[in-house]
Image (cartoon, coloured by chain):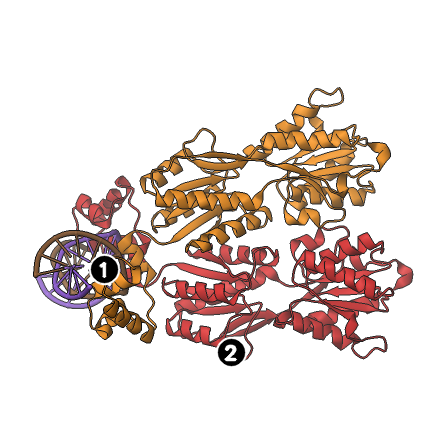
Chain colours: A orange, B red, C purple, D brown
Amino acid sequence: MNTIRDVAKKAGVSVATVSRVINKKGKVSEKTELAVLQAIKELSYQPNSIARSLSSRKSNVVALIVPSINNAFFPELARAVEDIAQLNGYKLFLCNTDDSREKLVDYLNSLGSQYVDGLIIDSHNIKEADLTKLSRLGIPVVMIDRVIENSNYTSITVNNRAGGRLATEHLLEVGCKKIAHIQGPKNEMNSVQRMWGYRDQVGKLPWFDESWIAHAEFSVKSGYQATKELLIRHQDMDGIFASNDLIAIGALKAAYEWGKKIPNELAIVGFDGIDMSELTVPGITTIQQPIYQIGELAMHELLNQIKNSHAKPKKYILDIELVLRESTMRSQRYI
Amino acid sequence: MNTIRDVAKKAGVSVATVSRVINKKGKVSEKTELAVLQAIKELSYQPNSIARSLSSRKSNVVALIVPSINNAFFPELARAVEDIAQLNGYKLFLCNTDDSREKLVDYLNSLGSQYVDGLIIDSHNIKEADLTKLSRLGIPVVMIDRVIENSNYTSITVNNRAGGRLATEHLLEVGCKKIAHIQGPKNEMNSVQRMWGYRDQVGKLPWFDESWIAHAEFSVKSGYQATKELLIRHQDMDGIFASNDLIAIGALKAAYEWGKKIPNELAIVGFDGIDMSELTVPGITTIQQPIYQIGELAMHELLNQIKNSHAKPKKYILDIELVLRESTMRSQRYI
DNA sequence: TTGAAAGCGTTACCAG
DNA sequence: CTGGTAACGCTTTCAA
């Protein structure tokens, strides 16, 4: 591999000049610039990014930390972040923590010792102290989706509780009388908020008690199991608000096996609006998050902080909306 | 941030000694080792990986290049690679090329200038010349899933043609008379091979002609559209072999909207065996690839090459198998 | 406009 | 066993 020295020699200039040409910094006469460019081409020289990082303390790499890569929500998000990163000349380091605090810390440490230029973090395992540490290292951070409340960092999320209310309200409107909820992980703010949204709507109704709330992971399989439990427990259940779309997909399957007709005997609403929610049979009514927009905004905010280290932290709470599909489209008489 | 020098000073030794302790290389007396360890702890010192890479020309990072992150096959694969990487003290750099040659080249270049210790590549855009270049840089490579034939590098794949045959044969066995195929991208070896497997079974039958082969991307939406076309074109179609599971999921939706009963009026077989194939309604019969095993093996082979640069390249062709689910489980009288 | 040289934080060789 | 020091390949002052 050729180094900057080889280029300098070939072009008959100093390494400093070559560096200037490469980085378009400082004054270089047109003539020498051409000579350098020529030498670079002839040697098919590629600057060594490691050396560059070491000396400049920046890497043009940002990292996105997600809790899972098997949940379609995150790939869709990653896509957005990657698009914007690439447009701005940044590479993306995609880190999958598997919802484990240990893996998260591992990544944080190793990213901290690598001059990543910024971090977008989606994890409920993150702690204030982690952020402080990153901040001391001078690494800007944007938190998305699962954010620490009241912390002084830029964050982007949606109003999960309002979403939960909206979902449940919709089920009531299409005529459901007994609505269950399948809650996501209990230790995650998002699913807790969605659950509260559900409670806001049905918590006071005479039939409601805790047995109408089942628990699941954010996965199809887990949603399937939780639905089976609910079906056994409540023969008269005619609506389910699932904490996310994956759970809703599992609910679809369980209901089908049980012989419940959707939506007339059982209506289902999901949350997130991943691509798949539109493509199941039947399509799933869901609370749509602006997934792409979240990723886009996150990356823009991060770039902003990278360029201007004194940028003020901002809190974004983006709007969600109900997307109507077959899983709740009951025939006229029900409405 | 503290450096190795700070540690050396605090422990009252030279940086060389600290380095020895950190890397467990060379002889260090127990006493000094303890002192160094102590200093490291007190300063909560973290070696700078960039500096380390620059000086040692290795990074303990391997990269996995995938064509897409929205197709569940790849996250499932990535999971396996990551597991093994982590067990061996390697970090994983996940690169998404979006099936674009340009992005691939981009990644290859930037990885080439970063001392990644190895590469697992899943891309039909890769060329022999790219591999030669990497090899000159001393970066070991393992190709998976979409491999260059006759090239002298380690590769792992499955027998796609045999899979195509198996799928189609199964449809014939459950009584299908007119079987269509939805082929994946024409420029990809995998989908072409699967298509040939289909042809091996039905190519000679009297009813067959090219109109029984539709074309699609490897996505649910695209599979949905292709199925709609087929339904219009062939009223008497009673079986579909889809080039992958995503396409099959789309076919399910299209058939449902069209009013075709699955499996009795239309039986469907997919390919890959992603988790989702089990969880749709109905479950999808599919040709199961050993996804986890592919990723596991790829990472092991890579580690092998990293450790022993003269390891001989190996060609693996792993077995696939038919997994029977509801989408082809016709009632007895049909069989 | 250009070049020399001092870092950046490690590793690893060579002496002692 | 331990320390001094020259790399690793680049960026960035400081002088000229």
Circle 2: residue type: Ser
x 38%, y 49%: residue: A111
Residue at which label 2 appears: B151
Residue assigned mark 1: A27
Left or right of B289 in this view: A50: left
B8 is higher (above) or lower (below) than A146 = below
Nearer to me, A32 or A222: A32
Q: Residue furthest right?
A: B333
- The subunit carrying tag 1 is A
> What is the crowding at mark 1: few (fewer than 14 residues within 10 Å), some, or many (at least 20)?
few
Q: Chain of mark 2?
A: B
Image location (x, y in percent) of residue B313:
48, 75
**Picture coordinates of residue A119 (x, y %)?**
42, 45
Q: What residue do we see at 44% from left, 36% from top? A: A154
Residue for point 81% across, 52% down: B257
Q: Position of residue B195 (x, y in %)?
A: 70, 72
Q: CA distance from mark 2 to mark 1?
A: 47 Å
| Quadrant (top left, top right, bottom left, bottom right) of the C terminus of chain B | bottom right
Query: From the viewer's perspective, is B303 left or right of B230?
Result: left
Closer mark to the observer between disc 2 and disc 1: 1
Say whether mark 1 and mark 2 are on the same chain: no
The front one of A252 and A330 is: A330
Lateral position of residue C3 relative to residue D11, left or right? left
- Secondary structure beneath disc 2? loop
Quick one: label 2, few (<14), some, or many (20+) residues within 10 Å? few
Secondary structure, mark 1, is: loop
Q: Is residue A1 visible?
A: no
Residue at image location 38% in from the left, 71% down from the top = B138
The amino acid sitting under disc 1 is Lys
Quick one: which residue is furthest to the front in this view? A30
